[in-house]
Image: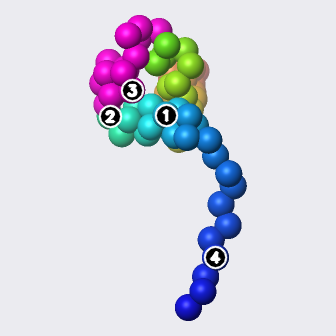
């Protein structure tokens, strides 16, 4: 059975960004990601490699929404 999977080309370096974001999304902290990736400065991990996923952004927005609407009911 010949089934070809079509994936977009990514650079090896892109996997490091994905790894950092995956670690953070799965409960590991920034220090864990820094050490796993081998960065000497945590700022590099935070500012360049770690990205919030859509689910986390939605959770943050929901948290804000709850705080703002809490004071208007009552």
Mark closest to the chain's N terminus, 4 or 3: 4
61 or 22: nearer the viewer? 22
31 or 69: nearer the viewer? 31
Marks 3 and 2, how far apart at CA: 16 Å
Where does the N terminus fall, quadrant-wise? bottom right
Q: Could you say which disc has been placed on residue 4 in the image?
A: 4
Q: Could you say which disc has been placed on residue 3 in the image?
A: none
Marks 4 and 1, how far apart at CA: 26 Å
* For discs 2 and 4, the disc positioned in front in the rendered view: 4
Image-based side of 25 in relation to 52, left or right:
left
Check if mark 2's residue and mark 1's residue have beta carbons within 8 Å.
no
Mark closest to the chain's N terminus, 3 or 2: 2
Q: Residues within 10 Å of mark 3 (few under 14, many from 20)?
A: some
Marks 2 and 1, how far apart at CA: 17 Å
Indicate yes or no whether the magenta region holds residue 45. no
* For discs 2 and 1, the disc positioned in front in the rendered view: 1
Q: Residues within 10 Å of mark 4 (few under 14, many from 20)?
A: few
Mark closest to the chain's N terminus, 2 or 1: 1
For disc 2, the marked residue is 27
From what the image shows, is residue 18 above or below residue 69?
A: below
30 or 10: nearer the viewer? 10
Numbered disc 4: secondary structure:
loop
For disc 3, the marked residue is 37
**Residue at 64%, 76% in the rendered image:** 4
User: Mainly helix, strand or loop, the magenta region?
Assistant: helix
Please provide the residue range marked out in magenta: 28-43
Check if mark 1's residue and mark 3's residue have beta carbons within 8 Å.
yes
Check if mark 2's residue and mark 4's residue have beta carbons within 8 Å.
no
**Residue at 52%, 24% in the rendered image:** 49
**Residue at 40%, 31% in the rendered image:** 24
Which quadrant of the figure has residue 13? top right
């Amino acid at each position: 059975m010949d089934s070809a999977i079509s994936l977009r080309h990514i650079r090896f370096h892109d996997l490091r960004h994905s790894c950092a974001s995956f670690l953070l999304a799965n409960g590991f902290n920034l220090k864990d990601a820094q050490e796993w990736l081998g960065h000497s400065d945590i700022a590099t991990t935070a500012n360049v490699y770690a990205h919030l996923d859509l689910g986390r952004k939605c959770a943050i927005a929901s948290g804000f929404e709850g705080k703002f609407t809490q004071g208007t009911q009552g």
